[in-house]
Image (spheres, rainbow, N blue to C red):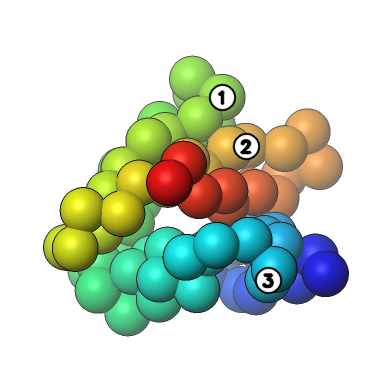
Amino acid sequence: MVQKIYIGGYYVKYDDQERNISYGVYYLQYDLNAEELRVFLDQARSKGQAEFEDHAGRNFTLMYNNDGTYTLISRD
């Protein structure tokens, strides 16, 4: 089911049934400082997406949506 969470001043949507997605949400919300998070948000907004991996090597993509929100997907 699609969930929406407020991270860094923006809404991030994700499918809570997607494998490993909770790790990506946690990484964005708690592991990054505000400056590091801003880098991903800005890249996704300007390029359409930002690919990253968490500390355990799990891969994610943060995509910018036309409505000003973001969507997080797992690439594993």
Residue under the image location 33 percent in, 69 percent down: 27
Amino acid under disc 3: Asp
Q: Residue at (37%, 35%) from the top-left corner?
A: 51
- Residue 30 is drawn in which quadrant? bottom left
21 and 8: which is toward the camera:
21
| Figure quadrant of the N terminus | bottom right
Judge whether residue 36 can be spotted in this image.
Answer: no
Q: Is residue 31 above or below residue 70?
A: below
The Cα atoms of the two marked residues, 3 and 1, are separated by: 22 Å
Identify the residue position indicated by label 3 in the image.
Answer: 16
Q: Residue 67: image x %, image y %?
A: 81, 42
Which three-letter amino acid code belongs to the residue tagged 1? Answer: Gly
Secondary-structure class at tag 3: loop
Task: Return the residue at label 1.
Answer: 48
State the image quarter where residue 4 is shown.
bottom right
Q: Which residue is mark 2?
A: 64
Q: Secondary structure at mark 1?
A: loop
Q: Residue at x 72, y 37 (%)?
A: 65
Sooner in the amino-acid sequence: mark 3 or mark 2: 3
**Marks 2 and 1 close (CB-CB < 8 Å):** yes
Residue 5 showing in the rendered view: yes
- The residue carrying pointer 1 sits among few (fewer than 14), some (14 to 19) or many (20 or more) residues within 10 Å by Cα, namely some
Residue 28 vertical placement versus 60 (above, below)? below
Do residues under tags 3 and 2 come within 8 Å of each other at their CB atoms?
no
Q: Which mark is residue 18?
A: none
Residue 2, position as x, y percentages in the image: 80, 65
Q: Earlier in the sequence, mark 2 or mark 1?
A: 1
